[in-house]
Amino acid sequence: MSREIKRQNIQRLEQYFHNGCKKDCRQKLGVELEHFIVEPKRQKNVPYSGAGGVRELLEEWQTFYPGVYREDGVLLGLYNSEYGLSLEPAAQLEISIAPQEKISSIERVYRSFLKTVLPSLERRGYALVTAGCRPFGTSEELELIPKKRYRYMDAYFQEKGPAGRQMMRSTAATQVSIDYCSEQDFIRKYRTACLAMPALKLLTDNTRILEGKPYSGYLARTGIWSRVDEGRCGILPGVFDRSFGFRAYAEYLWKLEPIVVPEKGSVRPVGHQRVCGLWADRLLEEEEIAHILSMTFPDVRVKQYVEIRGADSMPLPYVLAYTALLKGLTFDKTAGEELLDRYPVDSAAVKKAERSLAEKGFEGEIYGEPAAGFCRRLIDLAAKQLASEERRCLELFEELVQMKKTMGRE
């Protein structure tokens, strides 16, 4: 490996993140929400293929969308100027809402999506379910959509941990993306999200059923992800070290196994080869960098924005509450700085808190404090930074904390 190639490639990764800085600091929020498409009366999951399958739904909805995404001629996604529809590995339907400044705009776009797709679903007796894990069936019963990337990922994860199939087929999430304005702003927002993550996961815990059976614990989806690929999921080591920043994240990526790489408009599997080996003798292209970033799955991920990935899929009112909470905690530096000063934690402390919450829920502890009290502190800090309309969104979380119950146990 050429030392000069390595230096330039790490520099290119680092520069990619610098290019994501919003110079005008006009911060926006993007939301991605995954849904299970099910047939409630028969307690069945709707597969991608076959009569009445998700592919048939996409073909029907195509008339409403100017943009389509196909792979090898197979329809896998639709989009317009405000949002895109895509499919997760076992035909979970994801809406990706373009970045918005106001939470009310996110709500408007999502309701527009529902108005478009619900008639087709209701006519067939189908429903969109928002939950952390599928309400029906097991992962062994579910087919993958015909997307090469997912087929290769499925094989790879079966070697890395016991829960890869379950993660890909039976989980669904809510993801919120936030802009950053500088490297220092990125570091603050990234660390704030990591520090708050145990509480964020508890407040958004929405799993009643796991593999067709009632689930008595908490943070079921987190438990699944923790058994997938330790080096690619959860919290990154060193997040709270003084050296953390764009360079440290670039070096993490340089050692990553990317599973697949882009090739001639498609992808090919690369097994356990690492980025540093695959690009030992040539420079990374921007498309390749974007792909490598998409093959990491930590609770907080970087692209050219900070993507916060720890929440279960939830009904819209809770999605709006979650988005408001993150906006209040991150858009103004006051809340984040107060949290980071008050809780000088490390990655091990975050994991310890999550283990406590997974067992005890709101009776658990976060950084030595009662979980309910810590969650209440987050909500209060966020509320101070929000306008009254958006502050009201937080009332749903306030009720959960007061009752010491999660959505899955209301």
Image (cartoon, rainbow, N blue to C red):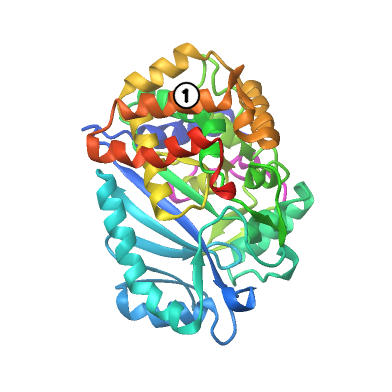
Instruction: Report the predominant secondary structure element of the magenta stretch.
Output: loop
Residue 111, horizontal then vertical, whole percent: 32, 62
Residue 345 or residue 68, whichever sits in front: 345
Does dot 1 land on a helix, a strand or a loop? loop
Image height of 214 relative to 329, above or below: below
Tell me if residue 66 is in the magenta stretch. no
The image quarter containing residue 370 is top right
Residue 125 or residue 179, whichever sits in front: 125
Tell me, yes or no, if residue 71 can be seen here. Answer: yes
Judged left or right of residue 360, residue 110 is left
**Name of the residue lying farthest toward the left:** 24
The residue positioned 63% from the left and 62% from the top of the image is 135
Residue 265, horizontal then vertical, whole percent: 49, 65
* Residue ID for mark 1: 245
Residue count near mark 1 (Cα–Cα under 10 Å), binned few <14, some 14–19, many ≥20: many
- The quadrant of the rendering that contains the N terminus is top right
What is the magenta range? 271-287
Residue 64, horizontal then vertical, whole percent: 31, 76
Tag 1: amino acid: Gly
Residue 131 or residue 275, whichever sits in front: 131
Residue 301, horizontal then vertical, whole percent: 50, 39
